[in-house]
Amino acid sequence: MKSKIKASHVSWIFFLSAMISMNSIPVHKAIAKGGSDIGLLIIGHGYFSQDQKFYEFVNEVQSRLPKNPVDSGLHMVMDMHTNKMWQTEDEAIRRFESKKVKKVVVIPLYMNTNVSTVDVIKWSIGCQVDGDPGKSNYLEEIVECPDSYDSENNLCIHMGGIHRRFHDFSDIQYIATNAIDYHPDISKVFLERALEFSTDKGNELVLLIGHGDGDDDIDNDYRNKVLAKYASDVKSMGEFYDVQYGTLREDWCDQKRSAVEEIRNKIIAAYNAGRKVIWVPARISSWSKVHDQQWDPQDCSVQGARDSLGIKDLFDAGMYTKANYLLYKPTSLADWAVSMFEEAVKKDQYIDCLDAK
């Protein structure tokens, strides 16, 4: 997600009002049965609101880690009073502090590690770089605030979200795992989603469709190294006629046009061959608007095109069936989260900015 956002001044008055407004946002408050000084923070996307399934997933992870405090935060939540976005991880960190937690493993609940939203999480966790405060030192990896840096308040502004460094208000040590990327547990989730709508596997095309990225290298890398593996897994496990994949690239109109056209052509070809098509979103939550939008290849040349280029005509014609999101029935997803947490704890590579000062 590489869109550029004009830098703006963010006052501490706004900071206080934004934090107060977060009280209206539902938060997860799981409490471990036992005591541990190592906690797990699961960070979801957010935006206007978060699907309740997100909190059910967090509870499922907590049930598997009864001795560790498990909490959640939302990476980008819209403040309806200011039309700005904020991170709500801060509230979870305060709860960790009240439980005397010393170290926190952060799991970004995103599909792809190699995106700017995950970079912002690393930026928030990392230590400020001397001479260049817009950057963070994250395990010897220098991470730059992806969009614009507010030097007066030491904030990273990205995709409308406003993020601050955790170490500015907390002495807890942090480490972040990778996002989902490829993991065999998640192949089982995709298979579950497809099988819910399957009636004749030998005559069905399953499409795994990801969000995608505006950067061609990132998008191609994710398609070829991640989605291709999932497609191979689902095809072999499910014995479908075929499993293909693609990305929508829906936040970038020029790229979206060719991406959606590629998917449309796959759907039309399968439909004309008498195949049933099952669209399985390779994403965490919230349906893409692409299912509700009319298709017009010229839309990218006019104002408002980002909200009008889609495949609604195919959907209305009944050429494909869209499956549920990844987060539903989160058993296998919880398996993945627990394995990531346990691996991070074993490595014990937490970032301590106090030593860097």
Image: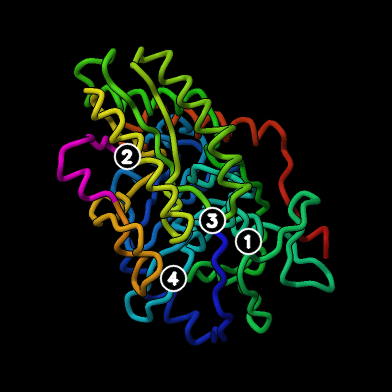
| Residue 157 seen in render | yes
180 falls in the magenta region: no
| 241 relative to 74 in the view: left or right | left
Could you tell me which residue is drawn at 57 percent across and 71 percent down? Answer: 4
**Residue picked out by circle 1:** 124
**Residue picked out by circle 4:** 85
Task: Say what secondary structure mark 4 lies in.
Answer: strand
CA distance for labels 3 and 4: 21 Å
> From the image, which quarter does the N terminus lie in?
bottom right
User: Residue 312 or 8: which is nearer the viewer?
Assistant: 312
Graded by Cα atoms within 10 Å as few (under 14), some (14 to 19) or many (20 or more), the crowding at tag 3 reads: many
**Residue picked out by circle 2:** 325
CA distance for labels 2 and 3: 22 Å
- Going from N to C along the chain, the mark reached first, 1 or 2, is 1
Tell me the magenta residue range. Answer: 311-324
Could you tell me which residue is drawn at 47 percent across and 84 percent down? Answer: 14
Numbered disc in front, either 3 or 4 = 3
Using the rendered view, name the quadrant where residue 271 is placed.
Answer: top left
317 falls in the magenta region: yes
- Going from N to C along the chain, the mark reached first, 1 or 4, is 4
Could you tell me which residue is drawn at 66 percent across and 66 percent down? Answer: 145
